[in-house]
């Protein structure tokens, strides 16, 4: 179980809270949807889970251990898949995978096998020798995911992984996420596409202004409505930046 | 195990830098093609202005119409010019005028008939000098002085010889021929000091300039990493910023050293192949080692500066402009574009604020003044301090940016 307990975080001491007492439980092996309008605190939450920032208050535990302690024994166990194309456009797909596997300190043989697995998982074999900068949007998203898988992680933090891709690529990515969870992995999935979250997430948390508004199994949260309706009901109709 | 992992991580970072640089045509052009062209063009174009041997391309001839031992002695003395090439005598005065008019020779000295007789009669000897009007004034007056000195010396020798014969004194010619020993004074006592030349000004100057242009490839990749979230991804993978910096620092220091080797090779072989002078390097191991240490210190300064620029710039375009302008200003002040010794005294003082100026002074200290490692140690320390300070600021800025 991943437990986020009473997390508080401000980007600046005088600024508004990005997270204001967030508590969420994420079951291992589940796909947990994290919903919220722009500026709700989703990316901050992912940053805390990825270890990029430390909460000012509260704590994160995984399987009963504090995040830092758990992570120090498993440095590659959490992979963040950012919204941006966080790789090197001048390197080929293969070279990108080898680089990110290398910086995780994987030995040569392991590195090769992991890169081959990630390449196959993301169906990128055909473009393995193509420069990443020349790939289409869908292929770039798949490479972004493949890079995250090179360290054989237990937990995937996906930040809007399907932005700007066609239906085929989106379905492929959603299926890949399902497969990852079926193989025992845990996924925290943020998206603005409600139908995606409904389709893949077993549980959801809706947050806004740094607070959890509603959390639970997807079916319970919906209660006969669409997720979109629940979301708008909770977060309102006013425009966000 | 941890050490092996660290090496695997560093190796991945180094390989990535090499691959991205190898595919960055603009970066490669800025690092290798630009300085090579500058060295070639500037070394050839400024060869005459900067070389003490610039007049070597000028020729002169002596037309001896007197044909006496005295006129032969004068002819021989006029031949002792290091800076001009003496050519075969013209057949006649008309031929001499023709040669000057056609630019074949810059000067012809005509020793008239009766020159020896004039001397014997204690009359002031006369010479005629034909001059190409295109010859610069300084060279013209210098040559005229040389001719006057030669005549005076021959006349004095002649007079002293006659005096010596009358007074039974031996070897009066030695009295009339004082020897002036010319010695270039370098840091070490050596027989021949290497004179500065265009190629010795331009090779280190444009090498230093191009080394600082690592700002282009470094900032392009670094800003891309920051903008696309790659740095954040690396942090999430527990790759420290220090490791990322080390991953950039070492490959680019190596790139700088390759630049140094290529530019020196251009100075030694390509410039002379194109008609310029060859770059001369110190021929002793300690001096070469001092040059290498200086080159490494320049690399540290250049890579530190590049990472600083990459950290303050918001886009790669901004970094290219900031880095480019910074480099050009440092180069202009530091004596890269205009040699320091041709600057007015007030401007020369400004070179001391430019790291490129420090570096160039260091190279000249070793290459021209035969300085040793101890002579350039303050320069090396200054460059290292500059590079490490720039690196520290870059690290601080990045830490601040990632903590919010």
Image: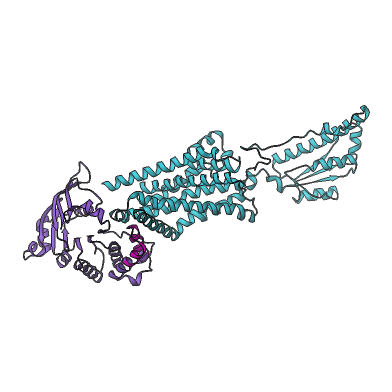
Chain colours: A purple, B cyan
Expressed as whole percent of the image width and height from the top left, the position of residue A37 reads 17, 56
At a point 57% along the width and 44% down the height, the residue shown is B286
Against A197, residue B326 (above or below) is above
Q: Give the percent coordinates (x, y) of residue B397.
A: 33, 44
Q: Is residue A185 magenta?
A: no
Q: Give residue B63's quadrant in the image.
A: top right
Q: Quarter of the image holding residue A104?
A: bottom left
Q: Position of residue B7 (x, y in %)?
A: 38, 55
Say whether residue A226 is left or right of residue B340: left
Judged left or right of residue A105, residue A3 is left
Q: Which residue appears at 34% of the width and 64% of the height?
A: A111
State the count of labels.
0
Taking B347 as reference, is A83 above or below it?
below
Q: Main secondary structure of the magenta part?
A: helix
Residue extending furthest toward the front: B1
Q: Nearer the viewer, residue B374 or A144?
A: B374
Q: Where residue A39 sits in the image (x, y, percent)?
A: 19, 52
User: Quick one: which residue is furthest to the top in this view?
Assistant: B167
**Nearer-the-camera pick, A199 or B274:** A199
Q: What is the magenta range?
A: A95-113
Residue B187, compared with residue A139, is above or below; it is: above
Q: Is residue A40 visible?
A: no
The question of residue A102 being in magenta is answered with yes
């Amino acid at each position: 179980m991943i437990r986020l307990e009473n997390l508080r975080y401000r980007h600046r001491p005088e600024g508004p809270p990005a997270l204001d007492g967030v508590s969420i439980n994420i079951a291992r092996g589940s796909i947990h949807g994290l919903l919220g309008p722009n500026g709700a605190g989703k990316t901050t939450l992912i940053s805390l889970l990825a270890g990029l920032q430390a909460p000012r208050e509260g704590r994160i535990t995984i399987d009963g251990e504090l995040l830092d302690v758990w992570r120090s024994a498993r440095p590659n166990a959490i992979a963040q898949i950012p919204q941006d194309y966080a790789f090197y456009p001048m390197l080929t797909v293969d070279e990108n995978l080898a680089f990110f596997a290398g910086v995780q300190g994987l030995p040569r043989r392991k590195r090769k096998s992991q890169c081959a697995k990630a390449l196959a998982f993301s169906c990128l074999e055909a473009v393995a020798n193509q420069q990443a900068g020349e790939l289409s949007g869908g292929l770039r998203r798949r490479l972004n995911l493949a890079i995250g898988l090179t360290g054989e992680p237990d937990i995937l933090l996906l930040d809007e992984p399907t932005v700007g891709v066609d239906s085929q690529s989106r379905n492929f990515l959603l299926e890949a996420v399902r497969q990852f969870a079926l193989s025992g992995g845990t996924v925290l999935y943020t998206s603005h596409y409600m139908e995606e979250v409904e389709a893949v997430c077993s549980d959801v948390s809706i947050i806004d202004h740094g607070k959890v508004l509603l959390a639970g199994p997807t079916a319970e949260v919906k209660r006969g409505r669409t997720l979109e309706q629940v979301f708008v009901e909770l977060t309102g109709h006013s425009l966000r930046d | 195990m941890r050490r092996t992992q660290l090496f695997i991580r560093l190796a991945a970072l180094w390989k990535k830098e090499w691959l991205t640089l190898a595919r960055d045509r603009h970066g490669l052009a800025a690092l290798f093609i630009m300085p090579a062209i500058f060295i070639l063009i500037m070394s050839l174009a400024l060869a005459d202005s900067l070389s003490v041997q610039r007049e070597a391309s000028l020729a002169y001839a002596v037309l001896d119409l007197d044909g006496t031992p005295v006129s032969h002695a004068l002819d021989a003395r006029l031949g002792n010019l290091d800076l001009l090439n003496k050519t075969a005598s013209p057949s006649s005065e008309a031929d001499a005028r023709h040669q000057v008019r056609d630019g074949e020779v810059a000067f012809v000295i005509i020793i008239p008939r009766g020159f020896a007789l004039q001397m014997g009669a204690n009359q002031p000897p006369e010479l005629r000098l034909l001059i190409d009007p295109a010859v610069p004034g300084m060279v013209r007056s210098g040559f005229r002085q040389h001719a006057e000195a030669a005549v005076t010396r021959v006349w004095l020798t002649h007079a002293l010889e006659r005096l010596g014969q009358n007074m039974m004194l031996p070897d009066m010619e030695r009295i009339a021929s004082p020897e002036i020993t010319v010695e270039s004074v370098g840091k070490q006592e050596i027989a021949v000091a290497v004179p500065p030349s265009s190629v010795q000004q331009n090779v280190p100057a444009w090498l230093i300039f191009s080394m600082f242009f690592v700002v282009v490839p470094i900032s392009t990749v670094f800003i891309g990493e920051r903008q696309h979230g790659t740095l954040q991804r690396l942090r999430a993978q527990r790759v420290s910023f220090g490791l990322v910096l080390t991953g950039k620092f070492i490959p680019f220091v190596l790139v700088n050293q390759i630049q140094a080797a290529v530019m020196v090779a251009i100075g030694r072989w390509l410039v002379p192949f194109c008609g310029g002078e060859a770059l001369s390097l110190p021929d002793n191991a300690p001096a070469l080692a001092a040059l290498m240490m200086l080159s490494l210190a320049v690399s540290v300064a250049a890579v530190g500066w590049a990472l600083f620029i990459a950290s303050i710039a918001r886009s790669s375009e901004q970094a290219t402009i900031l880095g480019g302008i910074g480099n050009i200003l440092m180069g202009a002040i530091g004596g890269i574009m205009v040699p320091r010794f041709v600057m007015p005294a007030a401007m020369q003082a400004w070179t001391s604020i430019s790291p490129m100026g420090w570096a160039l002074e260091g190279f000249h200290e070793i290459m021209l003044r035969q300085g040793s490692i101890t002579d350039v140690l303050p320069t090396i320390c200054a460059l290292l301090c500059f590079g490490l300070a720039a690196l520290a600021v870059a690290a601080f800025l990045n830490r601040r940016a990632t903590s919010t």
